[in-house]
Image (cartoon, grey):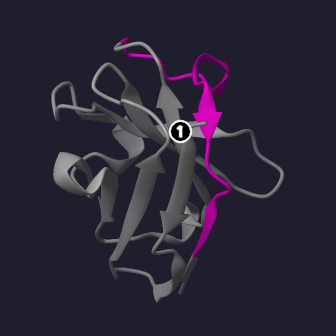
Amino acid sequence: QVQLVESGGGLVQAGGSLRLSCAASGGTFSGYMLGWFRQAPGKEREFVAHIGWSGVAARVTDSVKGRFAISADNAKNTVILQMNNLKIEDTAVYYCAADRTLVFHTLPDDYDYWGQGTQVTVSS
């Protein structure tokens, strides 16, 4: 059974940085797309970034471009979301997700497995 476990969330001041990790287990991920989504209170879950397990096809959404970067560490079965210059509007629960296809999916329904989420709070 595929399991995804996020870590690295917390409270940070605006302009600060956080590094989120997603540890994947229970499967062979070579053909998967790994993604990050976030959900703020009262809002729908939204796409943040995704990357092919081999490290190809990395993409971030426009609102975080230039501030966030996604990478994959195959040796550790981990996907990283490096978040710099954080803004108050980045406050949300961040979820790691896995898609069994190497397709540029950005909708939550297209992802097959989900972690429990990690809270990111950015203060002024």
List x then y, in percent, for residue 12.
Answer: 47, 86
Q: Which of 98 and 90 is in front in this view?
A: 98
Q: What stretch is highlighted in magenta?
A: 103-120
User: How far across and how far down the image is residue 6, in percent?
Assistant: 52, 61
| 32 lies left or right of 67 | right
Count neighbours of disc 1 (C-alpha within 10 A) and say few if under 14, some if 14 to 19, many if 20 or more: many
Report which quarter residue 117 is drawn in. bottom right
Q: Where is residue 91 in the image (x, y as percent from the top left)?
A: 59, 67
Residue type, label 1: Ala
Left/right of residue 18 with respect to residue 4 in the rendered view: left
SS class, disc 1: strand
Which residue is identified by label 1? 97
Residue drawn where x is 40% and y is 65% of the image: 20
Front residue of 42 and 117 = 117
> Is 100 inside the magenta-drawn segment?
no
The N terminus lies in quadrant: top right
Residue farthest along the right direction in this orientation: 42
Q: Is residue 69 left or right of residue 93?
A: left
